[in-house]
Image (tube, helix red, strand yellow):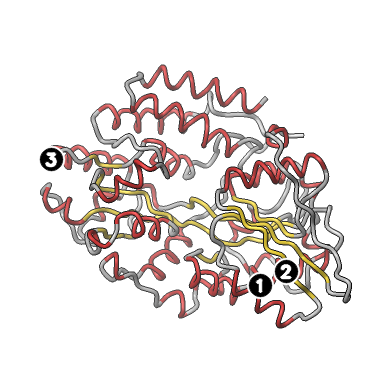
Amino acid sequence: MTSAAALAAVTAACGGGGADDGTIELSVATFGEFGYEELYAEYERQNPDVRIVPRKTGQGGPYHQALFTKLGGNSGLEDVVAVEEGYMADVLDASQRFHDLTEIGPDGVGPERWLDWKYDGGVDSDGRLIGYGTDIGPLAMCYRRDLFAEAGLPSDPEEVKPLFETWDSYFEAGDEFLAGSDGVAWFDSAAQIFNAMHNQLEVGYFDEDNTLTVGSNPGIRENWDRVTAAVQRGQSAGLVAMSNEWNSGFQESAFATKTCPAWMLGIIEGQAGDQHAGDWAVTDAFPGGGGNWGGSYLAVPTQTEHPEEAAKLAAWLTAPEQQITAFEASGAFPSQVEALDAPELTSTTDEYFGGAPTGELFAAQARKVDHAQYKGPGDGQIQENAATTALQTVEQGATPEQAWRRFVDSAERIAR
C-alpha cells in the first residue's frame, strides 16, 4: 500500500445503502466547493428511486487523509468519492480498489467527452478508467494594473503580455518592477511560482516507472535555481498560500502578480475586497505557454453496494450540462469539450477584473495544455510538504543549496 494509505486515522463514514421504501441511497464525498448542491436535487427529481447523501469536507488535506485511511481499512468509503488531481496518483496506485468506469458506467461516456489530457489523468497503468474528470485549473496570469503603472510598467492586459511570455521575461520584469515600486513584492510565494513551473515539465517528480526523479531531473533543478534566485533578489513576499497572512496580503497590496488558475479569481476577489475592484487584471499570457493547476475526478470504490448506480450518478454530474451548472454555482471550470464551447461559459466576463472575458480566456488556456504530466504515488505530498517547506526556508534566509538538499531528502523519504 502507498504511504498515503498510512496517513493518520480518522473516523470512517459509511457508504450508501437502501431505504425501507426501496429507495437507493448514494453517498457522495467532496471537499471544498464543487457546485453540486442544486445538481443533487435535480438528479433526485429525475431519478425518484435515488436519494443522495452528500458528505462535504471543507479542506482538501483532511478530506484526502480520511479517504486513504478508509481505503487502507477497506471500509467506510462513500459510493462516489472526489479525488483532487494531486492525489490521483495514489488512487491510481491502488486502482484495484476502484471500479473501471468503462465497465460499469453508462453507455456513451467515452474519452471524446473530455480534453485529452484530463481524461488521461484518470486512467491507470492497465488502461482502466478510474475517475470521471470534473473541473480543471487552466493557468493565466493575474496582476495589479495600478501597481504596474506606479512602477512604470505597462498595465493594459494586451501590453503586459510580453512581460509574461517566458519565465525569463517574467523574472526580468520583476526586477524592473522592484526598481520602481515602494516595498511591494513581485509575487506572493516561491512555492506558488515553483509549482506552476513544475507542472509544465514533461517529466515531473516521478517517471512512468514510478522512479523518483527529484534529484536527477534537470528541469526540476533549473526551475529551483530560477525561483530561488528571484527570492534572493527580493521578488517574493514570502507568504504561505492560503494562510491568514497570505489572505491579508491581497488587501494590503503585498505583491503585484499572481499565478492564476481559473479557480483563483474568486479567491482574489474574496480576499482583496471591494477596495481593490478594478485594480486586478488578468491576461491570457502565461510564462512557458500555459498549464493546468488543480481539478478533480469522481471515482467509484469497490466498497460500494451500488456500483452501476454510483457510476451513473458520477457520469451525470460530470456531463457538459452539469459542468456548466457547477461552473455557474461555484466557478469550477469545466473539463468537458462541449462545455468549453457553451455560450454560458464563453460569454462570461468578470467585472472585478475590469470586465475581462474570463470564460473565453480560460477556455483558450485549457486548450493550450497538450499533455497530462505523470504523477507518481506521493506526488501531492512532495509538492505540498517537501517543496513548499524547503522553499519557505529560502524566503526565511537559507541558501538555495541548503534548501535543495532538504527538498531532495524529504522527497526521498516520502517516496520510500
Which residue appears farthest toward the front when viewing the image?
20
Image location of residue 366, percent across then percent down:
47, 61
Is 190 situated above or below 408? below
Q: Amino acid at mark 3?
A: Asp
Please say if the residues under marks 1 and 2 sit with CB atoms less than 8 Å apart: yes
* Position in image of residue 298 (x %, y %): 68, 59
Q: Which tag, 3 or 1, sits closer to the chain's start?
A: 1
The answer to whether 13 is drawn above or below residue 229 in the figure is below
- Camera-nearest label, 3 or 1: 1
State the SS at label 1.
helix
Task: Please report the residue visible at 28 percent of the width from the left and 48 percent of the height from the top.
Answer: 257
**Depth order, front residue of 172/384:** 384
User: In percent of the image, x 46 and y 57: which residue is there?
Assistant: 138
Q: Hey, what amino acid is under mark 2?
A: Ile
Distance between the alpha carbons at the discs numbered 3 and 2 = 54 Å
Residue beneath disc 3: 182
Residue 2 falls left or right of residue 250:
right
Q: Earlier in the sequence, mark 1 or mark 2?
A: 1
Considering the numbered disc 2 on the image, is that residue within a helix, a strand or a loop?
A: strand
- Compared across the picture, whether 201 is left or right of 232 comes to right
Q: Residue at x 26, y 43 (%)?
A: 169
- Identify the image quadrant of residue 188: top left
Q: Which residue is mark 1?
A: 40
Mark closer to the chain start, 3 or 2:
2
Q: Are marks 3 and 2 in contact (CB under 8 Å)?
A: no
The residue under label 2 is 52
- Look at 67% across and 24% down and name the residue there: 416
Q: Is residue 245 above or below residue 331?
A: above
